Amino acid sequence: MNLPIWMPYALCGAGLIGLGLYGLLARPQLLRRILAFNVMGAGIFLLFGALARRGEIAYADPVPQAMIITGIVVAVSATALALALIVAHAGAGGGEGLPSDTPGGGKRDERGDDDARDDAGHDRRIPGRDRRRNEREGAAR
Amino acid sequence: MATPFDLALSLLVLVIAAFAVLGRHGFMAVVFFITFGLLLALAWLRLDAVDVALAEAAIGAGLTGVLLLVARSRLKALEPPLAPAPHPVLRAGAGVGAAAVTTGLVLAIPALPLSTGLQAEVMEQLPLTGTDNPVTAVLLNLRGWDTLLETLVLLAALLGVWTLAREIDWPGRAGRAHRTRPDGVLAQFGRVLPPLALVIGVYLVWVGGHRPGGAFQGGTVLAAAWIVTVMAGLLPAPRVDDRTLRTALLAGPVAFVVLAVAGLLADSVLVFPPDRAKLLLLGLEALLAVSIAATLAMLVFGAPEDRSGRDP
């Protein structure tokens, strides 16, 4: 077998891209979508890095390496922000998926949403978690 | 030439990634994702990309893994309504689409024209860049522009996370209070790991000047030391309006911008004079490592939250 060393990794990268794309489209939970998105990104990096390794070269090309490192750091920044958003989404009474994904899905559940809203008026407090705070503030008053 | 090891590793990376994406259990998926990142780092080593391997292990596997674990535990505590499974037709469509993308890429790989790459050009310029590590030379000098914007992306992400804080909690300590059992695993690790991580992190930053390593890899290890200490409850997370913290967050990007402007006045943007390049790069790398470590750790801690009743 005379396969160049980059070939299995390039194929692996192509496979990861498809796998991540599938997870991004077909997984309902937002956390799993972010995970799948990271798998897809890692696949793109691997394909890119493997393709840069083709030909008769003595050492790996530093330019793609630098670009991939930049990409990894940008990916983790975006992931951190996306994860903070889905936690806030769930904290605000949203589901672990998006409401638009399914007709009738993503219903707000009944865990104390309404009394928090009555109490806070237009204030965009996070329900559920805020109930305790509201009670405490009420007691302090 | 590809060895059986390369074939097995590529296959294993794919299988582990499949468990992470398709697995039913959320916690297992995250653990598989971390394993996936570590195996991927091994793949990067096989491709002679040691700097990328370090970045993937530290950032792709370690830091992203911690972020996912923290987010998962918070989501679990909030008990959001379950997301209903998508329609089978939609799933089948996604499967066909994803398979088509992979097939297209696989077919395209042998058809791509061969390129000689840019390593010859980089090697030609290397003596003028102030570092012996070609990847560091590209990151901080030749393509410094990318890296400057990248540090701003990190700050922008942190600002985004901070904007999710409620008015009432701002400005408080970042994240929520961590308490652990004093004889537990995390408390023990919290004492043992940070000193080691501190040494490894500083070494990685320093060694980036002539061997694989650098501000991003070293900064991430330094961030890990801080994260473990805080998560073990040994140190409180900093207040978000702490001046030292703000200085640490901004030091790297500001130094980078100052260098860019100074270069602009002297010659052109982000051009380092070769005779002083080594010193400038070393200083810049040190400041960047501090800022990267602070920003990444703050991204993991999260926005200030209601700490009442949890603060020890």
Image (cartoon, coloured by chain):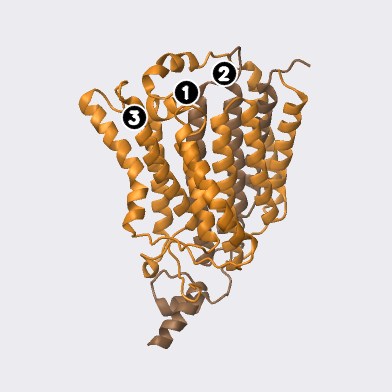
Q: Label 1 marks which chain's residue?
A: B
Tell me what hue chain B is rendered in: orange
Give the class, few, some or many, for how many residues have Cα within 10 Å of label 2's Cα (few <14, many ≥20): few
Quadrant placement of the N terminus of chain B: top right
- Residue B225 x/y as whole percent: 51, 51
The residue type indicated by label 3 comes to Leu
Q: Which disc is residue B134 wearing?
A: 1
In depth, the one of B243 and A49 nearer the eye is: B243
| Residue placed under numbered mark 3 in the picture | B279
- Residue B302 x/y as whole percent: 47, 58
The residue type indicated by label 2 comes to Tyr
Q: Is residue B127 visible?
A: yes
Q: Which disc is residue A59 wearing?
A: 2
In depth, the one of B230 and A2 nearer the eye is: B230
Distance between mark 2 and mark 1 Cα atoms: 11 Å
- On screen, residue B274 above or below A25: above
Distance between mark 3 and mark 1 Cα atoms: 16 Å
The residue type indicated by label 1 comes to Pro
Give the class, few, some or many, for how many residues have Cα within 10 Å of label 1's Cα (few <14, many ≥20): many
Q: Nearer the viewer, mark 3 or mark 1?
A: 3
- Give me the residue at 47% from left, 46% from top: A77
